[in-house]
Image: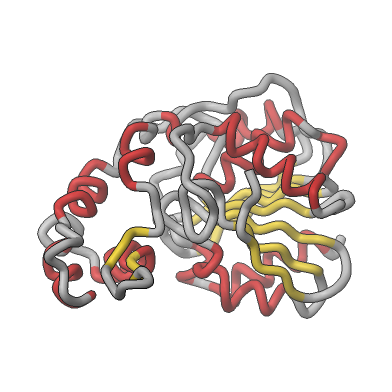
Amino acid sequence: MKLFFRELGQGQPLIILHGLFGSSDNWHSLSKVFAEKYKVYVVDQRNHGQSPHDPIHDYKALTDDLNEFIDDHQIEMPIVMGHSMGGKTAMNFAIRFPEKLSKLIVVDIVPKTYPVHHDSILEGLTSIDLGLLESRGQADEMLSQYVPQPAVRQFLLKNLARDNNQKFEWRINIPVLEKHIEDMGAELQYKGKFKGPALFIVGVKSNYFRAGDDVLIRSYFPGAEIVTLDTGHWVQAEDPKGFAEVVFNFVNK
């Protein structure tokens, strides 16, 4: 699959993968920060952003997409960084193709099974009748019945766009994501270890990391460093300055 991406900067390649319901747009500001020292590729994963839609959405497919992207663009030994779903993609890639990346950065996700916990979001998104929708404000009001947090709604509604006829459409493939939502919580799909440098950045207010997960992380990534920031799950958005500092400290070693 030919993925949409944004490219900026010069230097060692750094590939950034967004999370579920996200897109490359979410990394707009931070990608400019990283591009001061690195050649940054911010990718839209399948069924998200401006990348193609496809009926398959699991980590083996996402891993193959990333491998194809690296081969197509002749990217040599990139740093691969991913948040949430993107972090799971990055971990799977590192285990499957350990010889094809130099460093791994995983943001607020660990290599374990997670129960489905996006039910209300999917219910809210599917409740919006795009044919009757007249404004983003109206969509926000509808979604608020399912997603009370304004910041989360703002993030989700970035996926709302207008087509050539000025009608609203979703850039995310909601039916496919709903069908494969359990796959997004799956454990790693490959067996093995990535023995290269790895960094796990954890939000201390998030519930994605539990006591004992450090042992699990190092069973796959024996050289892993684990750094915490005083944030929730959206680490890079809640503390962009602290996040960038942690990333630069790691990649500059």
Occupied quadrant, residue 36: bottom right
> Where residue 141 sits in the image (x, y, percent)?
13, 70
Residue 244 appears in the figure:
yes
Q: How many labels does the image show?
A: 0
- Residue beneath the point at 57% across and 74% down: 28
Q: In this view, does 113 lie to the left or right of 140?
A: right
Q: Is residue 163 left or right of residue 129?
A: right
Vertical comparison of 136 with 206: above or below: below
> Where residue 188 sits in the image (x, y, percent)?
58, 27
Residue 201 appears in the figure:
no
What's the colour scheme?
secondary structure
- Residue beneath the point at 82% across and 61% down: 13
Frontmost residue, 242 versus 103: 103
> Where residue 27 sits in the image (x, y, percent)?
56, 69
> Where residue 147 sits in the image (x, y, percent)?
20, 58
- Residue beneath the point at 25% across and 46% down: 122
Q: In this view, does 64 lie to the left or right of 181?
A: right
Frontmost residue, 251 versus 177: 177
Which quadrant of the rendered structure holds the N terminus? top right
Which quadrant of the rendered structure holds the C terminus? bottom right
- Residue beneath the point at 19% across and 77% down: 135
Vertical comparison of 227 with 54: above or below: below
Frontmost residue, 85 versus 205: 85
